[in-house]
Image (cartoon, grey):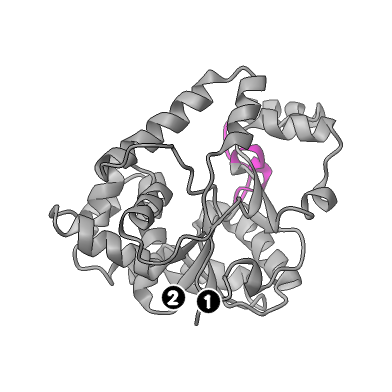
Amino acid sequence: MSLVLYCKSYRADLKRAVRLAQSVRQFNTDNIAFHLSAPQADVALFREHLAGLGVDVIADELIVRCNPKIDQARLASLPGNLSQQIVKSEFWRLGITDSYLCLDSDAVFIRPFQRSEFLCESGLPYSVMDESHELLDAALVARKPEVLHNFFAEAKAVQGRFERAGRAYAFGPFPVLWHKAVWESLETQFLAPHAMSLLDAIVQVPQEARWYGEALLRYQAIPLMPCQPLFKVYHYAWQLDRDRHAGIDAAQLAQLYSGVIYQSAWEREMDWPREGGSWSSRLARRLRRGLGRS
């Protein structure tokens, strides 16, 4: 297949994954195949709750076993925010597809979508890439200097590995489009010569989309066809508050974006099997939601 949808999830995000799958079923006009992976221990749970939604559920372990250079014991010892990056980035090794739209569980499509939104006429994927000025401008207005500092620090950390000077690019936010040839070029032209695995790279700098993007710029495994972010992503609560106060809703966002992502930390009522956190933190979240804040 030239393109599939792929989501890496785990049991705490089960309800979010079901919501995503329902939106895919509603809006997937080209019937693009949808694959979801979860830890082996959670596969049966996901298959039960996603039954009838056309999702192929596979085990994370099946993906990472495709790369013998990944130390399985070391991978299992990593925190989830790191290990999931490695699983996402290794999905191409299954040989299911050349390109994949890599989604997170908290994504939701808000309008019909087709392959042509994600693939050029050549059949190769667009690459999500810009200088993130929308986010950085908003951070200036909100007086959030740490947002700018973190953006440029993260960009520099990976740029430096490839000895690239110049502008700092964002290769996200998720969802992003990835092609196997770019991951292969990172493997053969950077990781192998440095006696590294992808796990080593992610542990050094946990920014999988930046590793992909900088490899694309350096080795040019596919032509670069940049595009703006595919989904409206609310990174921070103050962004969502700003749009709500401006009266911007999903119908308006659908003119520019295929979907929306609200950070899962703001939707803890969707944690599975129940809302996480202490009694006091749950109460505080409900009060914030009642006031229209995230």
Q: Nearer the viewer, residue 78 or 203?
A: 203
Vertical arrangement, residue 255 with respect to residue 147, above or below: below
- The residue at which mark 2 appears reads as 98
Task: Name the amino acid type tagged 2.
Answer: Asp
Q: Are marks 1 and 2 in contact (CB under 8 Å)?
A: yes
Task: Name the amino acid type tagged 1.
Answer: Gly
Vertical arrangement, residue 130 with respect to residue 244, above or below: below
Quadrant showing the C terminus: top right
The extreme right residue here reads 247
Q: Nearer the viewer, residue 201 or 130?
A: 130
Task: Name the residue located 22 percent from the left edge and 55 percent from the top edge.
Answer: 190
Extent of the magenta region: 265-278
- The residue at which mark 1 appears reads as 123
Q: Position of residue 260 (x, y in %)?
A: 69, 50
Vertical arrangement, residue 224 with respect to residue 168, above or below: below
Q: Nearer the viewer, mark 1 or mark 2?
A: 1
Q: Taking 198 as reference, is 240 left or right? A: right
Q: Taking 195 as reference, is 167 left or right? A: right
In what element is the residue under mark 2?
Answer: loop
Magenta stretch holds residue 274? yes
Task: Name the residue located 22 percent from the left edge and 52 percent from the top edge.
Answer: 74
Q: Is residue 70 visible in the rendered structure shown here?
A: no
